[in-house]
Amino acid sequence: MDFIFMLTQHDKTVPNCLEVLDNIGHIGISHIGFKDLGVDTDTLSTLTKRIKNTGAMSYMEVVSTTRKGVQTSIQTASKIGVDRVLGGQEIEFAMEVLKTTNVGYYPFPGRPTGHPTQLEGSPVDVKKDCIRIRAAGCPGVDLLAYRATQSDPLELVRAARAGLDTGYLIVAGSVDSPARIRELAEAGADAFTIGSAVFEGTFAPGNSSIVHQCQQILAVCEQLA
């Protein structure tokens, strides 16, 4: 299981993201990301470069709620050179913008709504979306399983796994405990994102430091390897 540490809280990039990155750069996190909201584009550009300098893969998750906003964020992701763009559902647009780059696009299956984003849709909907997304050439999806409002989260994960076949399944949003990570692994997820639970110190009670929280998450992933 890949742990993607998101420099985010409440679906926005934290204002001190560069400082946080400096503090955790030495502990071996190999996947680090941020949202398209919360800080300006210059900061996101600098952040992307610094993430890559740590040797980690960089991610931008798109949580803008309008079609224009999503498209603008995808264009921004292309310009600043992130490795993977997560979220949104502008598949044709993203594939066109990113076709001359090495950037991978992992859209949302189901029906994302609002901000912070919630997820509507059934397992059948999610499976169909994943099949369609893979057919369009995307390497995987970004599933908001624990933000589901109409279905059991793990049923959605299993449905996505079935629809993706060998595609890369990322589960994002509200992953906040070792138990949830283990559940996701058993259901077929390849990776998960955590942001708020780290910044709020709730993943591993007893020591609220960001470094400690991340180390505890990495330890769970090692146990699952």
Image (spheres, rainbow, N blue to C red):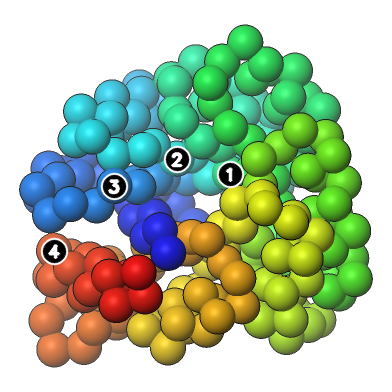
What's the CA distance linking mark 1 and mark 2?
Answer: 7 Å
What's the CA distance linking mark 3 and mark 1?
Answer: 17 Å
Q: Which residue is mark 2?
A: 59
Say what secondary structure mark 2 lies in: strand
Q: Amino acid at mark 4?
A: Val
Of pointers 3 and 1, the one earlier in the residue sequence: 3
Q: Amino acid at mark 1?
A: Leu
Report the front residue among 191 and 35: 191
Q: Which residue is mark 4?
A: 211
Q: Reply above or below: 85 against 13.
A: above
Foreground: disc 3 or disc 4: 3
Disc 1 and disc 2 in contact, CB within 8 angstroms: yes
Q: Which residue is mark 3?
A: 30
Of pointers 2 and 3, the one earlier in the residue sequence: 3
Instruction: Report the number of discs.
Output: 4
Q: Residue at x 24, y 52 (%)?
A: 29
Q: Which residue is mark 1?
A: 86
Disc 2 and disc 3 in contact, CB within 8 angstroms: no
Foreground: disc 3 or disc 1: 3
Residue 207, visible in the rendered structure:
yes
Q: Amino acid at mark 3?
A: Ser
Could you tell me which quadrant the N terminus lies in?
A: bottom left
Counting from the top left corner in percent of width and height, residue 167 is at 66, 50
